[in-house]
Amino acid sequence: MALQANHINKYFYAPDKFQALKDISFEVKKGEFVSIVGKSGCGKSTLLYILSTMDTAYDGSVQLAGENITGKKQDALAAFRNAHLGFVFQFHYLLPDFSCLKNVMIPALRLGKLSRAQIEEQAYEKLTLLGVGHQALKTASRISGGQQQRVAIARALINNPDIVMGDEPTGNLDTRNTAIVFDMLQQLCREQQKTVITVTHDNDFAAKSDRIIEMSDGVIVNQHTR
Amino acid sequence: MSININSEVALTYLIAKKKQTLVASLGVTFGISMYIFMNSLISGTNEYFEKMTLSATPHIRLYRDHQISNSDRLNHFLGKASTNLISNPKMVNSDERIDDPYTLLQALKTNPASLAVSPQITATIICSNGSLQENGNVSGVNILEQDKMFDITSTMIAGTVKDLSTDPNGIIIGSGMAENLSLKTGDNITLTTSKGSTKVLHVSGIFRTTIKNVDQTKCYANLSVVQQLLKKDRSYITDIYVNLKDYTKANRIGKQFELVTGYRVETWQSANEQSIAARMIRDMIANSVVITILIVAGFGIYNILNMMIYEKIKEIAILKATGFAGRHVVAIFIFQALFIGLLGSFTGILLGWLLSKTGSMIYIGKGNLEYLPVSFYAKHYIQGALFGIITSFFAGYVPALRASHVDPVEIIRG
């Protein structure tokens, strides 16, 4: 089991007390491609931030890659994210002062398992695989949106994570690039048995994934497997 | 490896914001250079005034104090049978002589702490050349010992101190006196004391200290000449001057001398308390200026790092999302602060040296002070750099801590 969420409740206190998530429980199998859909404000992003370990203020428990992450310290969670999770955000969120290659390398350098030369080689390999190898040495702010998103995916994959999470990974892309990004994520599931969990507005994107979880007002209203 | 990636990120940010980095380090540069310059100037000034003081005051002066009359003698002769009291006791007039001075001189000379020992007698005199007259005072000294102590040689403008030591009837006078009495070396000068004794001496040398009062009144003659003028015997000595190997220990060693010899001791510090006070005030002014500058430089770094963190807050969130822990973020910004501190300290040392060098070329030309007294000690430069780096560290630590508390969710949610 790649992910297990048990009875998650989440409240916001500002401006007024408001329950964003109501007793959410579900599981995701290893190698599954899951899309979470729903209207704006239904709580899908909030759920993703909890699953991604970044938000720790919730009730209930979350297990990722067989490890219970609820109640862990911030620094331990940072190390866990570094080693086991990959992120793709709606906006690429690359570091604009660094080259694309360096952007991809940074999480691996942080992990520190391989030598710099090995990391550089792998980073370049990932960029090439995603079709942006020729942009490797350009500064991240100087390439097009679609290319930036692909660099961001390469960054998410550099530490060979168990789970890749996406927050509207195609929200900012045109149809062609959306298709490319989707294919890449799907390939990860099929060929490398990675688990992919994305939050999306894009119904076409969601329709192609293995499972769709539909949310409304903080509860899961519908789940269907393809 | 983990240190490497933190510093790599930090360096990239520093290079990406060249202007901010430069401005922040310039703050440190000015702080450090002023620290170095102020300290060099103050220590140079202190040394100058200390040298001036020590060119006129011995490290230690031994003399016999007037004593108040006591009942020792009465007790001695009348015994303890009666209680002996002196009503209304007065100071006893003694001739101020030091008993058996040559044994004491020998003992002081062999003391490991002392560098030079010089016996003295002074007499108030009227100097005359024909009908010209000037008031003055003559010090009977062993001129070679005295020269070792006060470096009279460096102030001589005619003749040498040796000329006095070889001529029993010689005298060295100040330039003001020489001018007022129209005297040059080889001329005769008549000395008359208040007791009426007279002596004719020849001028063997003329000195100029640039202190007007000294140049117009002070004379040096041999011990025997002054003893004769005062109609005293050859063992009449009133003062013994002692210079020490380490003049800063004068107070402690002076105390010992006082206890051992029984004579009063005056150290150069107690004889020049006002200049010690002036020194303390100078130190205080310099320190407050320097501390102010360093604090201002510190706030400069603090401000710029704070701004940098504000601008980079999204990137900090991303770094945290991809696995950087709070302590890594702290390390990144501390590295930046230290880099700015190091850069600023290095250029500050250069600028500080340049300022000091330039300062030491400013012409003053008053008294015997030619140029602004500036000292050059490695100590000040090392201290300056150290202070710069420490200030930068603390100025960077506060914003770094703030950066480490960035919540990635809040930033990414937007």
Image: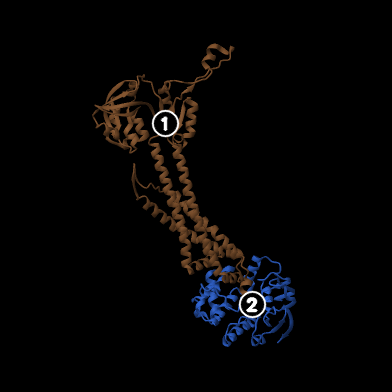
Chain colours: A blue, B brown
Q: Are marks 2 and 1 in contact (CB under 8 Å)?
A: no
Q: Position of residue B298 (x, y in %)?
A: 51, 58
Q: Which residue is the site of mark 2?
A: A164
For the point 54% across and 82% down, the residue is A131
User: Which type of secondary structure does the marked residue at label 2 adopt?
Assistant: strand
Determine the chain carrying the residue at label 1.
B
Left or right of A46, for residue B126: left
Viewer-nearest of discs 2 and 1? 1
Q: Position of residue A135 (x, y in %)?
A: 50, 79
**In the rendered image, is residue A107 in sight?**
no
Say which mark, if any, is on residue B242. 1
Q: Marks 2 and 1, how far apart in space?
A: 87 Å
Picture quarter containing residue B199? top left
Left or right of B292, for residue B82: right
**Which sits in the foreground, A155 or B250?**
B250
Q: Quadrant of the C terminus of chain A?
A: bottom right
**In the rendered image, is residue B147 in sight?**
yes
As displayed, is residue A140 above or below residue B1?
below
For the point 74% across and 78% down, the residue is A26
Crowding around mark 2 (Cα neighbors within 10 Å: few <14, some 14 to 19, many 20+) is many
Crowding around mark 1 (Cα neighbors within 10 Å: few <14, some 14 to 19, many 20+) is many
Determine the chain carrying the residue at label 2.
A
Which amino acid is tagged 2?
Val
